[in-house]
Image (cartoon, rainbow, N blue to C red):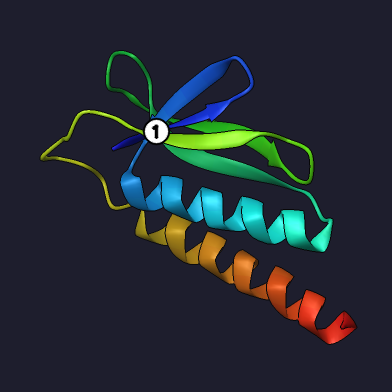
């Protein structure tokens, strides 16, 4: 599990989801784009929630380790979607070069 820190708050999500967010943020930074991302997370009581964040150039975001959780969700659909968005953003950048 990891905390995605955004502004003055953080959200707890799976390691794979946090990594996907970070990779997408880097891709958007390189391309000058921005996007709204609905991140699967859990609240303080452990209830699944979705948190919307805006990613783009100049918007600071970081991921920091959280306590290990044996029941960590995989968030496969979210990770697949963000991986595709990352690939698309980078492909568009390569086409313009």
Q: Residue at x 54, y 49 (%)?
A: 22
Q: Residue at x 44, y 59 (%)?
A: 79
The answer to whether 71 appears left or right of 58 in the picture is left
Question: Could you tell me which quadrant the C terminus lies in?
Answer: bottom right
Question: Can you give x and y, in whole percent of width and height, for residue 81 in the image?
Answer: 53, 63
The answer to whether 64 appears left or right of 51 in the picture is left
Which quadrant of the figure has residue 38?
top right
Q: Residue at x 14, y 40 (%)?
A: 71
Check disc 1: other Cα within 10 Å, few if <14, some if 14-19, many if 20+: few
Q: Which residue, given by chain and number where applicable, does mark 1 sit on?
A: 64
- Viewer-closest of 33 and 37: 33
Question: Can you give x and y, in whole percent of width and height, for residue 35 in the image?
Answer: 74, 49
The secondary structure type at the circle numbered 1 is strand
Question: Can you give x and y, in whole percent of width and height, for residue 7 in the image?
Answer: 64, 21
Q: Residue at x 52, y 27 (%)?
A: 5
Which quadrant of the figure has residue 43?
top left
Residue placed furthest toward the right? 96
Above or below, 69 against 93 in this view is above
- Viewer-closest of 55 and 65: 65
The answer to whether 35 appears left or right of 85 in the picture is right
């Amino acid at each position: 599990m990891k905390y995605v820190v955004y502004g003055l708050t953080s959200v707890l999500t799976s390691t794979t989801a946090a990594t996907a967010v970070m990779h997408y943020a880097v891709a958007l930074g390189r391309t000058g784009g921005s996007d709204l991302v609905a991140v699967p997370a859990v609240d303080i009581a452990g209830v699944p929630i979705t948190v919307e964040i805006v990613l783009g150039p100049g918007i600071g975001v970081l991921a920091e380790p959280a306590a290990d959780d044996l029941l960590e969700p995989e968030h496969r659909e979210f990770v697949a979607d963000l991986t595709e968005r990352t690939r698309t953003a980078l492909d568009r950048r390569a086409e313009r070069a």
